[in-house]
Image (cartoon, rainbow, N blue to C red):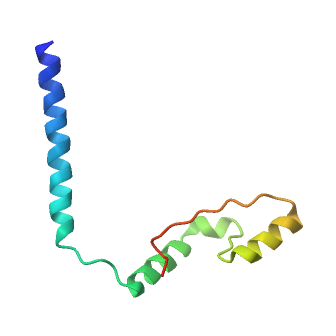
């Protein structure tokens, strides 16, 4: 039982140390600019993954195509590129 408590304490201490280290290192970073976010978005959109299917970035266009093809829309929204 004591061994289990020691292991649990060790795991909890490690997790707390990781959380604290991450929060301290994040404090010195500047948030990305809108230009940085636009470049990051374009880099993601240029990935090979997106070339294998037809993707829409305009919801109304996707809605029209969905109705025409009688298929559902899979939508993924993220705040990283909002602006």
For image coordinates 77% across by 58% down, the residue present is 72
Q: Residue furthest bottom?
A: 35
The quarter of the displayed image where residue 8 is located:
top left
Q: Is residue 64 left or right of residue 3?
A: right
Q: Is residue 76 left or right of residue 38?
A: right
Q: Where is residue 49? Give x, y as percent.
A: 58, 64
The quarter of the displayed image where residue 46 is located:
bottom right
Q: Residue furthest top?
A: 1
Q: Is residue 48 left or right of residue 56?
A: left
For image coordinates 19% across by 34% down, the residue present is 11
The quarter of the displayed image where residue 16 is located:
top left
For image coordinates 67% across by 65% down, the residue present is 52
Q: Where is residue 17? Give x, y as percent.
A: 14, 47
> In the image, is residue 37 above or below residue 19?
below
> In the image, is residue 14 above or below residue 3?
below
Residue closer to the observer: 48 or 63: 63
Q: Where is residue 41? Give x, y as percent.
A: 49, 76
Q: How many labels were placed on the picture?
A: 0
Check the picture and name the quadrant holding the N terminus. Answer: top left
> In the image, is residue 28 above or below residue 23?
below
For image coordinates 15% across by 21% down, the residue present is 5
Residue closer to the observer: 46 or 32: 32
């Amino acid at each position: 039982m004591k061994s289990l408590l020691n292991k649990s304490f060790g795991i909890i201490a490690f997790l707390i140390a990781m959380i604290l280290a991450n929060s301290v290192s994040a404090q010195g970073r500047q948030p990305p600019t809108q230009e940085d976010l636009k470049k990051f978005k374009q880099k993601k959109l240029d990935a090979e993954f997106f070339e294998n299917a037809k993707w829409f970035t305009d919801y109304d266009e996707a809605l029209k195509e969905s109705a025409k093809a009688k298929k559902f829309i899979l939508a993924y929204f993220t705040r990283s590129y909002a602006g």
